[in-house]
Image (cartoon, rainbow, N blue to C red):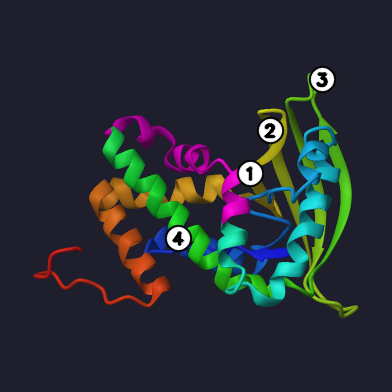
Amino acid sequence: MNINFDYVVEIECSDVKETIKKMKYKQSFPLLIAAALAVFGAHATVAAEVGPTQFLKSKDNALRPLLGSAKKNKKKILATIGEMMDFDALSKASLGAYWDKRSPAEQKEFSTTLRSLIEENLIKRLKDSKDNEIRYEDEKVNADKSEGSVTTIVKAGKSKRADEIEVVYKMKKNGGKWIVVDMVTDGVSLVGNYQSQFGKIINDEGFEALMKKMRDKLAEERGEKKPTPDEPKK
């Protein structure tokens, strides 16, 4: 399995555009971004007992049959991602120090919008990752087995000359099951990159400007008409 996560909220932030430009290709992530997909049927019990590498492999095997018809399988894909990915935690980490400065309503809107952006981008890009190959290199788990990491090498295609990308999955136990909380692609953290991008926009233009850019990006991803300055949002 390979998920092209892309920087779904690449929204006119000049200081981070070059980083994002370099990362766009590299963000063809294996397995799941939203990292882990739910275990199907009887696999659910097993997933809670295995290590992080086995967990990722099982999710890879579960997702691959769905890649050929990602749009058709959209509900199943997103439902399983939602079961295993803590979008609230991802949102909080992505805003960093700015999270506590927002009201509960603002936090909820940010989390909902970011999740929608990720989901829309995910469905569009899944078909591009079906030929990517994954090699599992290393696994580390702390003493109490509450946190771990898995290092993988992603080969973008089957050609001998295909580029290889290192992706390290940062994982934690949540309710006895592993989840991915961050991905480090060739040394660049997904959460850290989001923090840089969002923080720059908030510093320069304010939180509402960030939300407007995210709403506009989401409308673009969905093929919806953007509201004009004089047109109220629906």
Cα distance in 3D space between marks 3 and 4: 36 Å
- The residue identified by callout 4 is 117
Task: Look at the image and tell me in which quarter the N terminus lies.
Answer: bottom right
- Amino acid type at image mark 4: Leu
- The residue identified by callout 3 is 143
Residue 205 placement (x, y as % from top left): 24, 52
Mark 3 or mark 1: which is in front? 1
Residue 213 placement (x, y as % from top left): 31, 61
**Do callouts 3 and 1 mark residues in contact (Cβ within 8 Å)?**
no
- Residue 81 falls inside the magenta stretch: yes
- Amino acid type at image mark 1: Met
Give above or below for 214 relative to 82. below
Mark 1 or mark 4: which is in front? 1
Provide the secondary structure element on which disc 2 rests.
Answer: strand
- The residue identified by callout 2 is 172
Provide the secondary structure element on which disc 4 rests.
Answer: helix
Residue 214 placement (x, y as % from top left): 35, 59
Q: Earlier in the sequence, mark 3 or mark 4?
A: 4
